[in-house]
Amino acid sequence: MSCHQYENMHSRREFLQKTGLGLGAGALAHLLGGCASTSTADDPHINGLAGLPHFAPKAKRVICLFQSGGPSHLDLYDPKPELERQFDKDLPDSIRRGQRITGMVASQTRLACQPTRFKFARHGQSGGEFSELLPHISGIADDICVIRSMHTEAINHDPAITFFQTGSQLPGRPSMGAWTDYGLGRMNDNLPSFVVLISVNKEKSGQGLLARLWGSGFLPSAHQGVQFRGAGEPVLYLRDPEGLTRDQRKVMLEGVNELNRLNLATAGDPEISARISQAEMAYRMQASVPELMDLKGETKAVMDSYGPDVNTPGSFARNALLARRLAEKGVRFIQLYHRDWDHHGSLQDMLPKMTRDVDQPAAALVKDLKQRGMLDDTLVIWGGEFGRTPYAQGGANREKYGRDHHGKAFSIWMAGGGIKPGMTYGSTDDFGFNTLENPVHIHDLQATILHCLGINHERLTYRFQGRQFRLTDVHGRVVRDILA
Amino acid sequence: MACGLSAEDLRFNRDIRPILSENCFFCHGQDPKHREAKLRLDIRAEALMEHDSGFAIVPGHQEKSEILKRLLTHNPDDQMPPPESNRKVTPAQIELIRRWIAQGAPYEKHWSFVPPEKAPAPKLSDASWARQPFDRYVLAKLEAEKLKPSAEAKPATWLRRAAFDLTGLPPTPTEITAFESDASQRGEAAYAAAADHLLASPRFGERLAQDWLDVARYADTHGFNNDSARSMWRWRDWVIESFNANLPFDRFITEQLAGDLLPSPTPDQRLATAFNRNHVINSEGGIIDEEYRVEYVADRVRTTSTALLGLTTECARCHDHKFDPITQKDYYRMFAFFNNVLEYGEDGRIANAVPLLATPTREQQAELKRMDEAIAALDRKIAALKTDALGPAGLRERLAAEDAKLLPKSLKPAKPTEARILAKEAGIDAKRGTTLSVWFKASSSTADSPILSALDRSGNPAGVGYGNGRELRLVDGEIEWTASQRHPAYATIIRTIGANIGPGTWHQVAVHIQGKENAATIALFVDGEEVPTQTRHDGVSGAPANRDWLLGSDGKAKPFDGEVTGFRTYPSILKPEQVRQAFWLQSADKISEPQRKAADLRTLRRHIGSTQALQTERDTLWTQRLATVRNLPTTMVMEEMPVVRQAYVLNRGQYDAHGEKVEAGVPEELIAPWPKNAPKNRLGLAQWFLQPQHPLTARVVVNRFWAQLFGVGLVKSVEDFGTQGEWPSHPEVLDTLARDFVDGGWNVKGFFKSVVLSSTYRQTSDASPELYARDPENRLLARGPRVRLTSEQIRDQALAVSGLLAEKIGGPSVRPYQPESLYKGIVVDAPYPSTTWDLGKGDELYRRSLYTFWKRTVPHPAMLTFDSPDREFCSARRSRTNTPLQALVLWNETGYLESSRKLGERMLKEGGADDASRTTFAFRLATGRMPRAEESAVLTRTYAKLRADFTARPDDAAKLIKVGASVPDPALSAVELAAAAGVANMILTLDETITKN
């Protein structure tokens, strides 16, 4: 290859990266009956990086069901009978090992062991153990892989969530969805490839979320996630103003594009043709997004399977169903958030409210994907930023208790897209405080997610401020034991 | 572009170092912990030493140089870089290394670490094109590339380009016409005059501020998941004023880095230091203070390094820098400069974090001055009036008896036992309002001792409930009041100014406790008169606990050095005259003869006809002044602690892993020597950055300015001038500009003037597709800049051409249109300031975008869509994307729709009678030029179609024109206006409209 060719390729790639949701001008012009001034290949992986995926992917897409606040592994996925025996006794120093604790319990004179008040049982052929709060998720025990040995350094929400989503505790890095969009590009021509759905809880909402969690960090901002909303406009600024018809918008768009093409002939800047195609895609999104949000085509059986909340826009159930629809339409990374898992007190009341919101829809989503033959190439992840302490915040109590943040050990589950089904992976000590077997760090999880998408996490990099950055920093190892 | 170089062209810094840096230094660089095979390639002497497998580099002998063998081999055991590193050296790069070794493998110090010098004038076949000295280097490069400069842009095009670059707004058609005529008559002089005019516009400061606010990570909220509001806009206004006043850039930087350390700093100089407090601050309950305090210091290092050194020092936070010769110790020596602030990791839940400063606006400053002068004048008049000594005999006693009726019954606490008073007998109720008063006499020191305390100091200071309660202290002769839920993060602490209390005399303090108990509601009275206060901290976010009061003790430190007595509370807010009387009545046995005489005199004056009116006027004025002072906006600033906090190397960058002790310092050998006699503090650091021979500061700054004008820097990696950064496209241009900038007194306006008048800048950006393909980013400068406008400029232009723009400069940030449900499901579920977006009123909807309230965790979506950064960290370069969401914003965002409709109104009222002239009118407003015939045809055709549509659907026309807060002109037909608004929206959406060309 001559240097000149290299330069051209380089610039084309830069050009394509800048156009984010861009679609080949040719295809769009065809759609609108116009003609394109410059044409880029109508490549389904348009503007992904050359050489990606690095190897054949198991998963084409990801649905991440993020449970913000820190769900208690000890009350959901990781039963600890020892805590029952140690009720109200001090957490042994041999377990704590000098681990720092948050300011919430810094004034407590004791760290007293707190057992769960919820019953656990084995489910499915795989015999995975689940709390009674998860009647539906326990029903898909044979489809999912529960990891009990997750761990993170962060002990507070903001850094921990940011770490989970971007690989760094501090702001400034691209989110997982932005990385995959940057690396793999788009699979559809009328929707964004990284979509965010935020559930609005019935009661309160808890800790704040941050746009950076789906931000693009130092990557071009075209890679940031696009939020689809339950209330108001499904995508900000999507709807034409009242009084303007779709035909009028089309006439105006055609006029603008014609003027832009005339300008292109004089100015010569290829950015103008990119602008034309982006406007055309915007016009198509105005139709495709409302179609996607409209559930008329869903059968009653499917609707019912997600539970009664599915009829409430903005609920987790509705968003789970929308996630499946987005997955069908070729959206690459679908990020859901459900908030208020931060149960410092009254866990016994609050946690059941959370699982009531989430348990049935999450299980329904996995089953729905499976039934449609999509689970094999869709990676589903359920989890939060950390777990909760085996010691009580306040005093130990059989009935009413709370738990503080805990990053040394917690549980998540994954399903589909290249992950072994019906498996429980890793373990924690008798107190659920430290990981014991097969610890999985957040960076390991991220490496594994990228691996399922056919990406070598060490090779998806971006040069910024003189350094090659990647999602997993200089860490991360693919958890091969859980790969199908 | 390294290929095709002839032998004499080869340069280590440009051609070889980037290859070694990218592929070799990670394992063979300066970090000893990661050095493989003891081989170091970044220093020539080391690279030439013998190692186990021979010599890596033998100058002049490629065949003996191991490095080449390793690069060329296919044996994975020997291959370099190792296959698993995912690094690859291309055959062309290997060829460069071969030739470099053949030429003797010369090294150079990295280019950016050598001070800039002007290069000799280049040889040119025809230099007449050049207007500025640097144009010659641009031309020389073009000649070398066998390119010609593009033609000069039309005067109107240049004016629009320069107006956006210098004011952020488009020129009006009148200004364009005037300039076209002036340019045709006066030529160059017209350009210079136009540049001067734009530079003199107060809009210049707003334009320049935009980029500096990115660098300084300015925002109106603290960040992190509580993300409540902060007040830093006074600093933002200082930035605008400074650019407008053309404050020399070295002073601009010095005052921001160290204004507080200048001799007798002015309030503005202290305000400037807010630069280093713009970082994010975390108020999440339960975080570990030190962890975040360290982050804030690290953020200052990062920001300062990026802003002035253009170096990524961040890598050296955890280990020696892999690529640039900055060690971990260097990093923590830099860190030590910023480590000496009395601040807390957890702060800022509801307001500014400490330390903070009252920062009156210019109007408030004038108002205070006016009041002070009026008070002084009244005092002079009062003093001149005869008051007949102390009045008739017995007056004092009579007044005392009358005034006693003024006072409500106080709640006298039970007799203190062991200095304890029960709270239930002297409860504070801020909702109802409570006045507290107490007497004290310090025996010797007034440095710091507790007068009254109900602040809970039991438990672990790291705990979330530590320090709940209220407290009154004597600190350095001033009275300090604290109301706290958690000390100090969620406390309000105010201190008197000018009470000047000395030892040996009795004094009375009274406190008004009411409302939210924040700084604006608390008032302190000393000896019956209210005293102005300064806010030390204003974070209390709920009622402190009512606890037992300790007299003369805080339960921890030394008890009060002297006597405390006469504690009482009143179940209401006493009026100023009541406080005065309480003091007067209780003072009999306590105050000295001169004190009593003064107090008596003040009291009598309020009762003697001849002075009553004057005294009342003075009292009123004084009360107004106190209220003004209590409500001044505060700003977070830098303030040194009296005793320097010891800094350490932090192992692996961890806040609690203290390594070696370090003192403040800079990488002198690498970058520049420490200036003689410079103090080892931030002021010295500023002097170090700004010394004339500093190799980086001026280059980094002018490069960023250049990028503002051309869309890309001469060094493309504006944030990285290190060995991993990009080689400058025109090193001679960069160095000439940097040298002139420094030698010319850091003259910012001078810099911009010289560049916008240059031939390089004045080229047209119209170019052939071939030139765009060959040089997509215009690195060769064979054409003028063509760059999409920033998010701010796109909106500001829409407001300006539609006539909506409100031109007020500065003030608190405003909230223009934003989708209503934006925060739903995202922001914290607590009533902290800035968890709601209260839509602005009137002009607030139409201010320049620079003033839009910047909420870090959920920034304005239209601004994000057009690539505004989130301002969580220093950002020296914005991405420039082109997405469908941008089209949606321009089509459907309320503000753009309102601007479209207002522009439509202008078309109908000012654009002439027919469609052609109306569309021409709007097109020219937005693009700065007349439409060509075929463009006009498209616009009039669409206009007619829209009119026909709306004529058939008049109800829809009426709906369309309703958008926005401004009311459509009722004299206009809805159908006509809707059609015109549609055309206006098209024009505002054009690529050319949102592009500087």
Image (tube, rainbow, N blue to C red):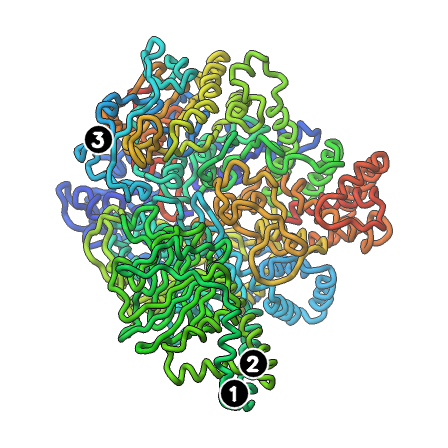
The answer for how far apart the CA atoms under marks 3 and 2 are is 73 Å
Q: Secondary structure at mark 3?
A: loop
Mark 2 crowd level (few <14, some 14–19, many ≥20, 10 Å Cα):
some
- What amino acid is found at the position of numbered circle 2 in the picture? His
Provide residue B456's location: percent of width, then percent of height: 32, 53
Q: Secondary structure at mark 1?
A: loop
Mark 1 crowd level (few <14, some 14–19, many ≥20, 10 Å Cα):
some
The answer for how far apart the CA atoms under marks 2 and 1 are is 10 Å
The residue beneath circle 2 is B607
- Write the residue at 43% across / 60% down: B411
Along the line of sight, the residue nearer the viewer: B704 or A179: A179
Residue B555 picture quarter: bottom left
Chain holding disc 1: B
Chain holding disc 2: B
Provide residue B609's location: percent of width, then percent of height: 60, 84
The residue beneath circle 3 is A89
The answer for how far apart the CA atoms under marks 1 and 3 are is 77 Å
Residue B946, relative to residue B544: is it above or below?
A: above
| Residues flagged by tags 2 and 1 on a common chain | yes
Left or right: residue B76 versus residue B170 is: left
Along the line of sight, the residue nearer the viewer: A470 or B549: B549
**In the image, which disc is placed on residue B391?**
1
- What amino acid is found at the position of numbered circle 3 in the picture? Lys
Mark 3 crowd level (few <14, some 14–19, many ≥20, 10 Å Cα):
some
- Write the residue at 32% across / 11% down: A126
Q: Earlier in the sequence, mark 2 or mark 1?
A: 1
